[in-house]
Image: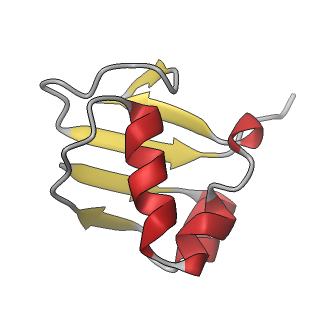
């Protein structure tokens, strides 16, 4: 599965993207796996109220299934006018 990181999430993790193998069934489980990897992941995902997720380029929720998903993207909320 391809995992993409944008904006300050990318800065905290230090990578724009990575290919990972996971047994996670949901986005929340994937976040738990990532946070357990290293402190930089734990910091990036410490407050999921300020992180958005897209599955195959569609906005989604933490409880969403990862079955059949090829790409997960994490990014802060977009603001602007």
The residue at the point 19 percent across, 30 percent down is: 69
Observer-nearest residue: 15 or 24?
24
The residue at the point 68 percent across, 41 percent down is: 48
Residue 41 location, quadrant: bottom right
- The outermost residue toward the right is 81
Whole-percent x, y for residue 64 in the image: 40, 19
Whole-percent x, y for residue 27 in the image: 41, 34
Q: Which quadrant is the C terminus positioned in?
A: top right
Residue 78 location, quadrant: top right
Whole-percent x, y for residue 80 in the image: 84, 34
Residue 39 is left or right of residue 65, and the answer is right
The residue at the point 75 percent across, 35 percent down is: 49
- Count of picture labels: 0
Observer-nearest residue: 76 or 80?
76
32 to 40, vertically: above or below: above
Whole-percent x, y for residue 2 in the image: 23, 52
> What scheme was used to colour the molecule?
secondary structure
Observer-nearest residue: 65 or 60?
65
């Amino acid at each position: 599965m391809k995992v993409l990181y944008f904006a300050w999430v990318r800065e905290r993790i230090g990578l724009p993207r990575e290919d990972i193998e996971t047994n996670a069934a949901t986005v929340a489980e994937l976040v738990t796996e990532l946070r357990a990897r290293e402190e930089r992941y734990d910091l990036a995902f410490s407050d999921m109220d300020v992180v958005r997720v897209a599955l195959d380029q569609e906005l989604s929720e933490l409880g969403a299934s990862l079955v059949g998903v090829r790409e997960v993207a994490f990014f802060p909320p977009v603001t602007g006018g």
